[in-house]
């Protein structure tokens, strides 16, 4: 299978594809070392069930062939777009750059705001933690999607890198939106590089002929060593 130099499309997921475990939600509700009691676990399960009825997972994906990579980490794509400061994505044999924007849609965060206005801050915070856990699962699903697309080309998918993480410039967010049809899934970008709906995710990942050694978990590759939500090693 050969793709053209530029290819964009939209992917939709069923909410049940992103089902989350209570422990996953608890980490975002109370921190990595938090252990909920039985009553709280029931409330987490109820919030997760409510969240499934509120999310509408979708993603905009773009694959763009790489025509040049400079020693300084700039990447020029076939349509003339250039990523500045993309050294972490500059494997010597990389041939495509995948740009991805995904979202859960606006309904879950709208419900969180409603709960806050009603004074139910506990439930609002809990439902927000559910949303973050769903967003994690969406990120995993989208990396599997780019991995599948890479395999169809006889290539391997590298690590995903999001704007503002591990020194990757936040300004790369504009390029990601230029390389995808994010508006088609209802995601917009403001002047501060913040996406709306807020429960959205974006990243770039390279495709090349050689596999990269993946981190054992997302947190292992992150430089925020003191994050209170950092996944603990067992």
Image: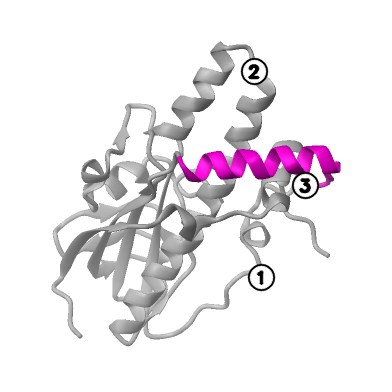
Residue assigned mark 2: 120
| Separation of marks 2 and 1 at Cα, in angstroms | 37 Å
Q: Residue at x 32, y 87 (%)?
A: 154
Residue assigned mark 1: 216
Q: Position of residue 25 (x, y in %)?
A: 67, 46
Give the secondary structure at mark 2.
Answer: loop
Q: Position of residue 137 (x, y in %)?
A: 53, 56
* Dot 1 alpha-carbon crowd within 10 angstroms: few under 14, some 14 to 19, many 20 or more: few
Q: Is 37 a magenta residue? A: yes
Give the secondary structure at mark 3.
Answer: loop
Instruction: Classify residue 208 as left or right of residue 234.
Output: left
Residue assigned mark 3: 32
The disc, 2 or 1, on the residue closer to the chain's N-terminal end is 2
Name the quarter where the C terminus is drawn.
Answer: bottom right
Q: Residue at x 37, y 76 (%)?
A: 148
* Dot 2 alpha-carbon crowd within 10 angstroms: few under 14, some 14 to 19, many 20 or more: few
Which quarter of the figure has residue 220? Answer: bottom right
Relative depth, front residue between 95 and 17: 17
**Magenta stretch, residue numbers:** 33-53
């Amino acid at each position: 299978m050969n793709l053209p130099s530029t290819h964009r499309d939209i992917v939709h997921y069923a909410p049940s594809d992103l089902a989350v475990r209570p422990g996953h939600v608890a980490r975002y509700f109370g921190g990595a070392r938090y252990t909920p009691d039985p009553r709280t676990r029931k409330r987490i399960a109820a919030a997760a069930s409510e969240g499934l009825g509120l999310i509408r997972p979708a993603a905009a994906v773009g694959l763009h062939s790489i025509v040049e990579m400079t020693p300084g980490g700039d990447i020029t794509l076939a349509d003339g777009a250039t990523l500045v400061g993309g050294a972490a994505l500059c494997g010597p044999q990389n041939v495509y750059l995948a740009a991805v924007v995904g979202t859960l849609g606006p309904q879950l965060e709208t419900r969180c705001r409603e709960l806050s206005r009603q004074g139910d801050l506990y439930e609002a915070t809990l439902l927000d933690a559910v949303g973050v856990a769903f967003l994690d699962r969406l990120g995993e699903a989208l990396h599997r999607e780019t991995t599948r697309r890479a395999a169809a080309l006889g290539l391997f998918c590298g690590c995903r890198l999001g704007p503002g993480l591990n020194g990757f410039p936040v300004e790369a967010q504009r390029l990601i939106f230029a390389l995808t049809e994010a508006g088609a899934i209802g995601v917009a970008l403001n002047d501060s590089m913040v996406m709306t709906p807020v429960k959205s995710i974006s990243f770039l990942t390279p495709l090349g002929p050689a596999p990269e050694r993946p981190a054992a978990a997302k947190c292992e590759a992150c430089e925020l060593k003191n994050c209170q939500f950092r996944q603990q090693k067992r």
